[in-house]
Amino acid sequence: MRTSGFSPVAESYSEDQRVMPASSMVTRVRIADTEQDIDQIMPLACELHREDLHRNLKLDRPKLRRFFMRALNPKQPNALLIAERAGRITGFLYATIGETFFGPSRVASCMLFYVLPQFRGSVDVFRLLKACQLWAKMQIAEQVSVQITFRAEPF
């Protein structure tokens, strides 16, 4: 169910991303399509967990990796969108398509959405959301839902 058209970039995540200035180069958004992409996303996903409403719940890295791997299966209605500047990942968005519980309408749900702190408020956030909207339209979804749990207080 994924559509291609974005080319993969084989760059590894490094601590340098945390100090890369927000003005560095142009932001590019693409669909993850290799296990190496998943490897690059994992450190950011762990950061998301530390900042998220669910931070007091145990993080199971192998389970999280399996979750991301579903996005690589073209038969699954999932997408892992990656924002990059100069070949370095600045953020990601994981979305899935499903029917509503009350009818056959298809809706895209953004399940995970993370952007490195220095890129929050930048065009990277906007481009990830727009790419998700475009992907959802290509998957014939009627709506896109984004849930934000960032910095919410746990029970």
Image: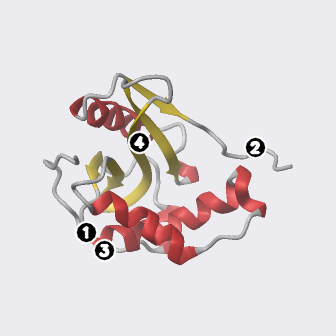
Gap between marks 1 and 2, in whole Å?
32 Å
Coordinates of residue 103 in the picture (x, y in percent):
42, 23
Reading the image, the residue beneath label 2 is 152
Disc on the earlier residue, 3 or 2:
3
- For the point 41% across and 63% down, which residue is it? 68
Reading the image, the residue beneath label 4 is 124
Q: Are marks 1 and 2 in contact (CB under 8 Å)?
A: no
Gap between marks 4 and 1, in whole Å?
21 Å
- For the point 65% across and 70% down, which residue is it? 59
- For the point 55% across and 50% down, which residue is it? 118
Reading the image, the residue beneath label 1 is 34
The amino acid beneath tag 3 is: Gln
Reading the image, the residue beneath label 3 is 36
- Residue projecting furthest to the left: 5
Q: Are marks 1 and 3 in contact (CB under 8 Å)?
A: yes
Quadrant in the picture for residue 67: bottom left
Disc on the earlier residue, 3 or 4:
3
Q: From the viewer's perspective, is residue 9 above or below residue 21?
A: below
Coordinates of residue 7 in the picture (x, y in percent):
16, 57
The amino acid beneath tag 2 is: Ala
Which of discs 4 and 1 lies nearer the camera? The answer is 1
Gap between marks 3 and 4, in whole Å?
21 Å
Crowding at mark 3 (Cα within 10 Å: few <14, some 14-19, many 20+):
some
Crowding at mark 2 (Cα within 10 Å: few <14, some 14-19, many 20+):
few
